[in-house]
Amino acid sequence: MDIVNRSVTAIVCGDLSLFSVLLYLYALYRDSYLAIWALSCLLLILRVILFDPAFVMPLSTQALLIFQLLFVGTGLMQVWGAYVFAEESFEKKWLYAAIFVSLVSYLMLLTPGRGSFFMFILPTAWLTGLMLLWTGRTFMRLIFGIDKYMTGGVLTLMGLHNFDFPFMVYFNAGIWERLLTVTLQLIAGFGFLMFYLGKARRDQISKERYYKLVGENLMSREKYYRLIAENALDIIYRFQYKPKRGFEYISSAVTNITGYTPADFYADPMLEMKITHPDDLISLAEFRNKPAQMDRPAVFRLIHKNGALIWTEQRGVPIYEDGTVTAFEGIIRDITPRKRMEQDMAKLEGLNAIGQMAANIAHEIRNPMTTVRGYLQLLGGKSEFNAYKDEFELLLSELDRTNAIITEYLALSKEKTVDFTTGQLNDVINAMLPLMQADANANTKSIKTNMRELPEIQLNDKEIRQLILNLVRNGLEAMDSGGMLTIETGVNDKGVVLAVRDQGKGIPEEILSKLGTPFFTTKKDGTGLGLAVCYRIASRHGAMIEYETSPEGTDFYIYFPMPDTGAKN
């Protein structure tokens, strides 16, 4: 009996050592499967303390029930912990198997004689052995290196040992069984320690590699994002309010859009406010202070370093720290070409509307005017009206002037059919030059030409004459006495270009958006149809009109498509 007690003490010490190792590792790493396995060891310890010395003596039915629950519970805990370790869902087949085996074991108690306990313990031991084999296989599958054999291998041996456990009890070989059990438990505890020491080392190396990789990745990403920002067409910026007000970053695209370098903005925190159009300063302040409006872009005007007006579209977001805005990040896009296109489209829409009206009413107006003019000529030729000759001539001249306005009005008609021929733009200018120079000389002004060699293009001679004449007369009227108007032709990447430059005072900013609108004029006797007709003629020729204006004068550019691109006809 002393030998039995000593062997029981040894088993309990072995189980306690494994239990202590698992509990210690759980306290360090907080892995739930370690707690489950520690509970499995605790059930094993209770089973050994309560029932192991009694294997040589009969047990009551109640004692066998507790023994059965502890034995099967130990195996189920092992399997559950393995599933958690493998990060897989627990399969209920093990629970059903445990219930089935427990029922079979109790049926085995009906076996008479000494073999009844053997038949009772055999199904339970073998099922627990299968559970330990599966747990060992899980470790062998998921762990690599020597840890694989120190844990998975030992758990496999413990599972195999459960198959011979009933026979050792039956043949009273308990001391050897206990010695083998203690040895395997000690090796298992050592294996768990080795596994977690190796795991800690691997985690540390992985963490160092991870931080190194993250650091390199962050540096690479920062370099990549900076490269994108520096080469973006839009301005990307970060403006900080605290601790020091000023631009923390602004991309190099700011130079192309505003004419100022990033260094200029870094040196002067108020430069952005200085180049913002005065009428948009309040809107800019509201844009920065009302984050609820960040869902849509805000449109502001900036003044280029050369004085040109730049339309911009901005998006941004405030950066908060402790409930206070400490910085503002945003993107600025140059939408000047889009604004010009919108203005051109608005003009064309107006021209289309006017054209449709012109097609409907022009002839109806001309018919009664022709009748009135005929009767005025007839009456003016009679002797009794000689005293009213001047009045008749005035009436006829006013009718002719009205007819000229209607002619310009008809030029806006969308339905007007125009015949195109292949011709030289320079030839049209040269044919009109004497007339234009005479007009300039009469007003003590002059005209200079600079015509380069041009390819032949598709054009309508009469309409091009009208376009050139309208632009030249506008330029001459914009200049004071002694001014010089320049007519140039050439070829660039936009096509065949006609440029008309005057030395006037420029076009006021407030009327730039209305330029070319039908019936809008700043002249005392103007009709407001001159530029509108120019836009219509250009549209029919597939040409594009652009302009530049400053206090030194205004330049109009008409870009005709190259011969290979074709023209409207």
Image: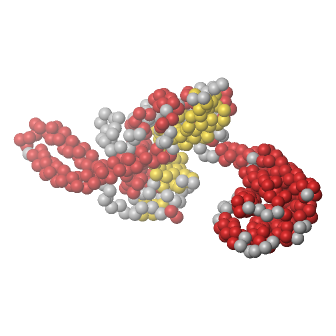
Q: Position of residue 18 (x, y in %)?
A: 84, 53
- Asked where in the image residue 219 lies, by quadrant, the reply is top right
Q: Position of residue 288 (x, y in %)?
A: 53, 32
- Asked where in the image residue 226 lies, by quadrant, the reply is top right
Q: Can you name the residue that lies furthest to the left here?
A: 384
Q: Is residue 261 above or below residue 135?
A: above
Q: Nearer the viewer, residue 206 or 479?
A: 206
Q: Position of residue 252 (x, y in %)?
A: 66, 40
Q: Nearer the viewer, residue 96 or 433?
A: 96
Q: Residue at x 72, y 47 (%)?
A: 221
Q: Residue at x 67, y 65 (%)?
A: 95
Q: Residue at x 78, y 69 (%)?
A: 117
* Quadrant occupied by the C terminus: bottom left
**In the image, is 525 to the left or to the right of 197?**
left
**In the image, is 441 to the left or to the right of 264?**
left
Q: Position of residue 220 (x, y in %)?
A: 75, 48
Q: Nearer the viewer, residue 111 or 182?
A: 111
Visible residue check, residue 509: yes
**In the image, is 66 to the left or to the right of 175?**
left
Q: Is residue 42 above or below residue 275?
A: below
Colour treatment of the image: secondary structure
Visible residue check, residue 553: no
* Quadrant occupied by the N terminus: bottom right
Q: How many marks?
A: 0
